[in-house]
């Protein structure tokens, strides 16, 4: 340590680390190790696609199960079925060509989470969580994964929640009482993520000058204070400013790589003139470009929630809350509207998987190292209790889980021996990729079977 400011920053980081709070040390490590690296072959990537209004488990069952397996499914007994020779539900048709990469995972419970209408950070942090920031207990699993594989942004969040614009509170969390931010409009994501690959405007030049000014003046002010608590506060400010400067420097070194992957988005969409469907497709383009440019390795994308007013899909605007309560849409039954929505989501996933499979990396493609999870943010139905959180998982050849693809897997029913929770699933992913955490998330106090640790049969 060369000066008192370094001491303060180190001390503050230590204090925050003990409390489990984030002070962006991973960003600094990333800059120190490889500021100008291209996307490396074999980099693991994770995409969480959240949908609102629940997902009925019955909607994911292959339609051609045998009579015996249908009976087991009805009783929610354990199943492990090869999808070869089985017909997927009709709404999955857009992703049928990616069947070799698909696993349908049923039976994970999430009763330790806040389910129902709005879940906030709950299903990604495996905890009770409400709208109040004070209820956030930990960094969500997507953020934890982002920290394991360094990149300038670590983790990017996109959202179509509530038809918001700009940069808003997200549904991930970076630590206790610390919600993540999310890009709610393609224009805000485009401007903030890809600026280093485009010609700088006066505002961007001013930001860089401001960071340098703040860094210098924080150091000057800090040298004049003798109060330890004040020094800790200044250390936190200094660390945040220095992290922004470090990330900006890293992005500048990657400018040519970023410039080569700037997405092509229509000007009207960048100016916030779009339907929800146009917004969703634009976000897929931004997501793909962010991964190709090496800006991040983990993206969480909220496709919709109960506050999303859907236009651009059907002739009439869809109110998801009303559909969740079984109300028809100008004569179209609610179940049929739900089917249209799921089918639309599969079109988005098809574009995403096609884009990754079409992006060379090493001896293969970017999809080889990617895991995409499509999940209902509020569980098994509109008014969910967390008895099930169904997953559709699309995985490349190099994904570090032993769960076979082309599978329909139903884990043992709630409180049956071998039953697993959302916490077990996320522990499995973290363990498989090198995080030795004993168990991620809260326990279900009502569950009588052992619920600690990873799902052993899924770890290679």
Image (spheres, grey):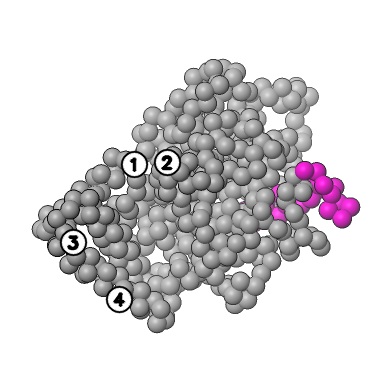
**Mark 2 vs mark 1, CA separation in Å:** 8 Å
Question: Where does the magenta region start and end?
Answer: 325-349
Q: Where residue 18 appears, x then y in whole percent?
A: 28, 40
Q: Is residue 169 visible?
A: yes
Relative to 81, is 323 above or below? below
Toward which corner of the image does residue 400 lie, by quadrant?
top left
131 on left or right of 237: right
* Residue at mark 2: 138
Residue 331 counted in the magenta span: yes
Toward which corner of the image does residue 199 lie, by quadrant?
bottom left
Q: Residue 222 shows which numbered tag?
A: 3
Out of 85 and 58, give the one closest to the viewer: 58
Graded by Cα atoms within 10 Å as few (under 14), some (14 to 19) or many (20 or more), the crowding at tag 2 reads many
Q: Where residue 298 appears, x then y in whole percent?
A: 46, 52
Q: Which one is earlier in the sequence, the residue at label 4 or at label 1?
A: 1
* Residue at mark 4: 209
């Amino acid at each position: 340590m060369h000066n008192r400011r370094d001491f303060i920053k180190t001390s503050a980081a230590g204090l925050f680390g003990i409390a489990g709070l984030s002070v962006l040390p991973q960003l600094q490590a990333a800059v120190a190790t490889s500021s100008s690296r291209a996307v490396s072959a074999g980099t693991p990537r994770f995409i969480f696609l959240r949908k609102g209004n629940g997902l009925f488990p019955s909607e994911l069952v292959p339609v051609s199960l045998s009579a015996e397996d249908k009976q087991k499914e009805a009783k929610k007994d354990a199943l492990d079925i090869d999808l070869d020779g089985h017909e997927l539900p009709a709404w999955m048709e857009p992703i049928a060509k990616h069947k070799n990469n698909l696993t349908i995972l049923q039976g994970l419970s999430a009763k330790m989470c806040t389910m129902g209408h709005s879940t906030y950070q709950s299903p990604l942090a495996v905890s009770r969580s409400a709208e109040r920031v004070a209820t956030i207990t930990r960094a969500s699993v997507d953020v934890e994964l982002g920290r394991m594989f360094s990149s300038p942004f670590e983790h990017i969040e996109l959202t179509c929640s509530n038809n918001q614009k700009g940069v808003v509170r997200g549904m991930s969390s970076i630590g206790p009482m610390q919600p993540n931010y999310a890009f709610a409009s393609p224009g805000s994501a485009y401007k903030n993520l890809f600026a280093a690959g485009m010609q700088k405007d006066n505002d961007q030049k001013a930001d860089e000058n401001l960071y340098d000014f703040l860094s210098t003046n924080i150091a000057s002010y800090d040298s004049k204070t003798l109060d330890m608590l004040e020094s800790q506060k200044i250390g936190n400010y200094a660390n945040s400013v220095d992290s922004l400067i470090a990330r900006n420097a890293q992005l500048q070194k990657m400018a040519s790589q970023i410039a080569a992957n700037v997405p092509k988005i229509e000007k009207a969409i960048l100016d916030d003139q779009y339907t929800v469907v146009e917004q969703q497709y634009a976000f897929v383009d931004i997501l793909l470009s962010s991964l190709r440019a090496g800006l991040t390795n983990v993206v969480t994308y909220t496709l919709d929630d109960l506050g999303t007013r859907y236009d651009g899909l059907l002739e009439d605007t869809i109110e998801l809350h009303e559909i969740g309560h079984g109300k028809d849409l100008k004569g179209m039954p609610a179940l049929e509207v739900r089917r249209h929505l799921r089918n639309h989501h599969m079109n988005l996933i098809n574009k995403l998987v096609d884009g990754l499979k079409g992006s060379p990396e090493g001896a293969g493609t970017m999809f080889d190292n990617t895991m995409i999870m499509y999940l209902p943010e509020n569980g098994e139905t509109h008014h969910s209790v967390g008895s099930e959180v169904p997953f559709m998982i699309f995985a490349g050849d190099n994904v570090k889980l032993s769960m076979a693809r082309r599978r329909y897997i139903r884990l043992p029913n709630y409180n049956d021996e071998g039953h697993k929770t959302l916490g077990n699933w996320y522990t499995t992913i973290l363990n498989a990729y090198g995080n030795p955490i004993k168990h991620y998330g809260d326990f279900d106090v009502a569950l009588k079977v052992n619920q600690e640790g990873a799902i052993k049969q899924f770890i290679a």
